[in-house]
Amino acid sequence: MKKINVIGLMTGTSCDGMDLCLIECYLSDGIPIGKIIKTKYVKYSEDFSKSLLKLNISPIKDIAQSHMDLGKLWSVEINNWVKKNKFKVDLIGIHGQTIFHNGQKSSIQIGEPLYISKVLKIPVIYNFRIKDIINKGQGAPLMPIVDNWIFKNTKENIITLNIGGISNISILNQNKNILGFDTGPGMSLSDLYCLRFLSQNFDINGNLSSKGNVDTNLVKKWICNEKFILANPPKSADKELFGSKWIEKNINDYNSHENNLANLAYFTSLCISLNIKANNQAKDTTIYVSGGGINNKSIMKNLSELLPEYNILSIAEKGIDPKYKEAYAFALLAASNYFNVAINAKYITGAVEPYIIGETALWR
């Protein structure tokens, strides 16, 4: 049995830093299996983080420079981590920093992979979304593909919920095809609000939102005004849909920061719960949560109240750190490229045919 060591690198929409996850991976019955060896978080400087958050409205020269700067930074940080711990690494998978995503049409992630390949002298798998879009898929979400591998042999009804910048779910019911899609905002709106009005990257642990009062009528109005929320899957979203323009249109200046953040947290939670109720009919279903939103106590409290019939647990119960699940996922997706595993995302993204995910960057 051939085993390889793979590093997955993920940078989310909060642009606060990079998550690294090293796994030992092998193929079993045509499915990549990954065991986590080590994880690491690298925080970006405040100025660099703010510059990344503005890239979707920045001049092309700034985007091009950030593409190179990210590649250089990642190569240095990964190389330092590998050397310090004397890791043996065969492959790296990088998602890249998303600056634009329009499901079924286009998607752009930046961060030059050749810097990493040159420094570490190994191949880098990147550009994970484009083949899916060319195959008439949404290009997102990709997490359900990995969830299907993780829970392939499970005997229970499961929903996985990843609350990153955008929230997405995977519904894995016994004897049925997996269904996966984006439900709406995750932490993107809350993060943007905090950056704009409070000069901080996010609502730490949901401390501010937990002190606010929710205006349920207002949040329900947001739901009704946004067709995406109740649309049938496949569907994918990004900050273009739930971003700065959304904040400008919907947030009231006269409200307190605590109340505004409480409303945004409830909006995220209600979008998730409505989509789960509309698309899952199985009883006795457990929800496994990952992503930064798991640390927001307002969102988690809302979910427990909105979905009382579900058992809501952390993905840590399955041996995966919820903070590093996305980095773990891109390590596993990179391994699937290495092992030539064809991805069938028909019931997730709508892609019409299987494909080998990602491209290979190799310095020669």
Image (spheres, grey):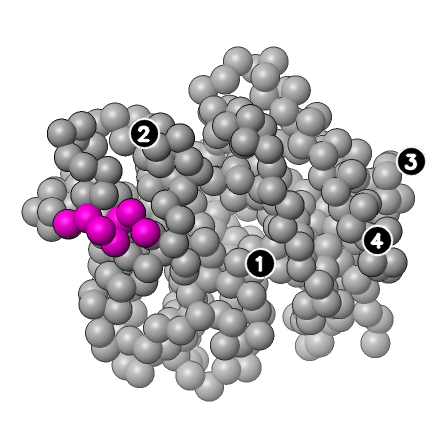
SS at mark 1 in the image? helix
Q: Mark 1 or mark 3: name the one nearer the start of the chain.
A: 1
Badge nearest the viewer, 4 or 1: 4
Q: Are marks 3 and 2 in contact (CB under 8 Å)?
A: no
Q: Is residue 240 visible?
A: no
The residue under the point 20% across, 32% down is: 251
The residue pinned by badge 2 equals 197
Name the mark nearer the viewer: 1 or 2. 2
Q: Residues within 10 Å of mark 3 (few under 14, many from 20)?
A: few
- Give the magenta-colored segment's residue range: 207-213
x and y percentages locating residue 298 in the rendered image: 28, 57
Label 1 vs label 2: CA separation?
Answer: 28 Å
* Three-letter amino acid code of the residue under disc 2: Phe
For the residue pair 25 and 345, the one nearer the viewer reads as 25
Whole-number angstrom distance, CA of label 1 to CA of label 3: 31 Å
Residue at image position (27%, 31%) is 247
Say if mark 1 contacts mark 2, CB within 8 Å.
no
Q: Residues within 10 Å of mark 4 (few under 14, many from 20)?
A: few
Judge from the rendering whether residue 357 lies leftward or rightward of residue 204; answer left or right.
right
